Structures are given as structure tokens and as C-alpha cells.
Image: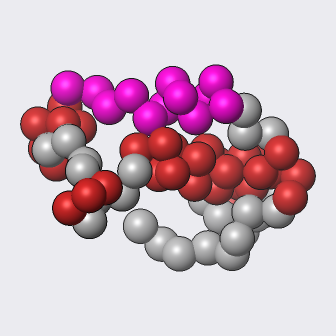
Amino acid sequence: MPSMKDPSPEAIANVTEDNVRTRAQLLPEEVSAEGHPDPAEGGIDPEVQAAVILAESEERTIHADPDDAQGGHRQSSDTADLP
């Protein structure tokens, strides 16, 4: 995963406890692929991981990078060769 700057206070404020609790519940596919994380054995606490993921997502939503293919809103005329 590419590293990015820390989420802004605005992005962090948009992350609710309910969102974190919901995202921290691992899907069966996640458990089978990675096992259930055990913080006592060095695994990342699912709630901490969920909070970080959600804050980074909020940051990308609030401060979208127009040069990023995922965040940009371009028109076809911005990339197509014009006659």
C-alpha cells in the first residue's frame, strides 16, 4: 500500500466509533487469508487498523488529488487528442 500523509483533523473527525466497530469486524475471507490478528502476538488491533483505513479514506474524499487517477474528475477532452 502506498504511504501517504497523515489524515487531517477534519478527516479523523469524520470517522465515527460505529464505523470503526463495523470495519473492524473481519470478513471470513480476511480471516482465512491472514488469520485473526492477535495483538498479544504482534498483530495489529483490528479496531486500530480500521480507524487508520477509514481516516485515510476520508482524507482522500475531503482532499482529493486531481492528479490521482482515483481522485481526479476529468473530461475526455483532458486526455484525448483533439483533431
Looking at the picture, tell me which residue is in the foreground, 19 or 69.
19
Q: Quadrant of residue 79?
A: bottom right
Kindly identify the residue that appears in the image at 64 percent across and 24 percent down.
18
Q: Which of 41 and 44 is in front in this view?
A: 41
Q: Residue at x 88, y 52 (%)?
A: 10
Is 30 on the left or on the right of 65, as rendered? left
Percent position (x, y) of residue 74?
76, 52
Q: Looking at the image, what colour scheme do you see?
A: secondary structure
Q: How many labels does the image show?
A: 0
In this view, the residue in front, 52 or 64, is 52
Find the magenta span and give its range.
Answer: 17-28
Q: Residue at 59%, 47% (x, y): give it.
A: 51
Which residue ends up furthest to the front in the rendered image? Answer: 40
Q: Please check the rendered image and state whether residue 40 is part of the magenta-colored stretch, yes or no.
A: no
Above or below for 68 versus 55: below
The quarter in which the N terminus is drawn is bottom left
- 36 horizontally vs 11: left or right: left
Residue 36 rendering spot, x and y as whole percentages: 20, 42
Find residue 71 and report its horizontal and vertical position in percent.
69, 53
The residue sitting at 67% across, 51% down in the picture is 55
Magenta stretch, overall SS: helix
Along the horizontal axis of the image, is 60 left or right of 53? Answer: right
Is residue 54 at all visible to an observer of this figure?
yes
Task: Quarter of the image for the C terminus: give it.
Answer: bottom right
Residue 81 visible, this angle: no
Tell me residue 43's x, y (percent). Answer: 28, 59
